[in-house]
Image: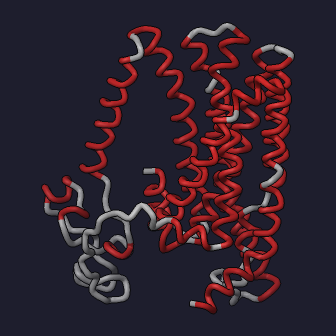
């Protein structure tokens, strides 16, 4: 579903508003991941651990029903700009099938079988999903670097989130509900960081277009392969990386010296805000670089970042036992620095790589 959401954003959002859409998407996911432990802790405290799974069945089942009733098809190969009635019941909502409604037609009076350019849209064939279809995305140098930056930040954040339960319960003597509440600062900070970064990405894009239009003339084409897309989308990533490092180191020191729990929560807020903003920058750029396969690109990103997170979480406890929490999270903080040269290379050579791909195509 996460990858599909990016596919929908690529379908419905223009390039100058895409950052805001990605920001809202990540805002929701950050809030959800922080509320989950709170809800789980409350259910476990009051009704036992089995209540968590009953809650998930009801919640996800309701979500599924709403999706099949009201969520329309957005893929442009099927519905064009949204004015084309999709062929086949599988591409329509139950609501539209029951009411037999027709989608709004294009302004030039095109028939339901015609797309934006007046060409008939073929009925797509149902194919068995290929889980390896995302791997070619990793062969694209620009996409690979964006995915690696995302994976580095996600892996470290996953390790921090995993440590919250075990470390905080042991150090601060929290119960189930209190242990769930410690996830809120990271989620709240991440939500605001995602939303704010999305607005910043769009504002910075418009500012760059305006500046280049003034220097190169009013006829400047923002869709030109010479447009500094990578520099524009990743502006601020170095500040975010430094903020993440400070938050991680502070978190490790707070655990080692058993500082007041408020210090640890502030470090979580700081880290959650910075990493979520980084995800927004990278998610927007990855969508820009893969407009015709946005969901597939996100599937590749999910594969790499989840494998990275699994490795980071696997070594968490052995590291804490051997070097202590301060040393452990200092190592994780140093891993964040690996993303800085990747971002520099992408900003430096991204335009040339895209131009080379267009010439090869």
Image quarter hosting the C terminus: bottom right
Q: Position of residue 328 (x, y in %)?
A: 80, 31
Q: Is residue 206 above or below residue 238?
A: below
312 sits to left or right of 72: right
> Where, by quadrant of the figure, is residue 56 drawn?
top left
Q: Residue furthest bottom?
A: 359
Asked whether 140 or 61 is in front, the reply is 140
Q: Is residue 64 above or below residue 317?
A: below
Q: Position of residue 95 (x, y in %)?
A: 20, 53
Q: Residue shown at 69%/17% (left/top)?
A: 168
Q: Residue shown at 66%/44% (left/top)?
A: 155
Q: Residue shown at 59%/56% (left/top)?
A: 20
Q: Position of residue 258 (x, y in %)?
A: 82, 14
> Where, by quadrant of the figure, is residue 355 drawn?
bottom right
> Where, by quadrant of the figure, is residue 137 drawn?
bottom right
297 sits to left or right of 168: left
Q: Residue shown at 26%/50% (left/top)?
A: 68
Q: Position of residue 276 (x, y in %)?
A: 66, 45
């Amino acid at each position: 579903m996460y990858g599909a959401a990016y596919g929908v954003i690529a379908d419905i959002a223009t390039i100058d508003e895409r950052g805001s859409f990605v920001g809202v998407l990540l805002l929701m996911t950050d809030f959800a991941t922080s509320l989950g432990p709170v809800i789980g802790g409350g259910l476990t405290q009051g009704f036992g651990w089995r209540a968590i799974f009953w809650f998930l069945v009801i919640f996800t089942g309701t979500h599924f029903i709403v999706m099949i009733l009201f969520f329309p098809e957005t893929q442009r190969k099927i519905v064009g700009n949204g004015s084309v009635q999709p062929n086949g019941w599988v591409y329509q909502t139950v609501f539209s099938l029951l009411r037999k409604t027709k989608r709004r037609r294009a302004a030039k009076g095109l028939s339901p079988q015609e797309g934006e350019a007046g060409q008939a849209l073929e009925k797509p064939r149902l194919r068995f999903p290929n889980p390896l279809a995302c791997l070619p995305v990793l062969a694209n140098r620009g996409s690979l670097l964006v995915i690696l930056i995302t994976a580095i930040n996600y892996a470290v954040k996953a390790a921090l989130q995993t440590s919250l339960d075990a470390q905080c319960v042991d150090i601060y003597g929290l119960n189930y509900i209190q242990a769930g509440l410690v996830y809120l600062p990271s989620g709240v900070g991440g939500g605001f960081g995602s939303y704010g970064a999305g607005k910043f990405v769009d504002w910075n894009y418009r500012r760059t277009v305006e500046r280049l239009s003034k220097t190169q003339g009013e006829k400047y084409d923002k869709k030109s392969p010479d447009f500094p897309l990578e520099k524009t989308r990743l502006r601020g990533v170095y500040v975010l990386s430094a903020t993440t490092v400070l938050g991680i180191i502070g978190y490790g020191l707070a655990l080692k010296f058993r500082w007041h729990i408020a210090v640890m929560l502030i470090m979580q807020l700081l880290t959650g805000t910075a990493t979520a903003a980084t995800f927004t920058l990278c998610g927007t750029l990855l969508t820009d670089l893969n407009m015709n396969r946005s969901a597939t690109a996100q599937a590749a990103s999910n594969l790499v970042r989840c494998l990275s997170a699994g490795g980071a979480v696997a070594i968490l406890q052995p590291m804490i036992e051997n070097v202590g929490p301060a040393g452990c999270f200092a190592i994780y903080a140093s891993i964040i620095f690996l993303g800085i040269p990747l971002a520099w290379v992408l900003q430096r050579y991204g335009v040339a790589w895209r131009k080379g791909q267009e010439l090869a195509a």
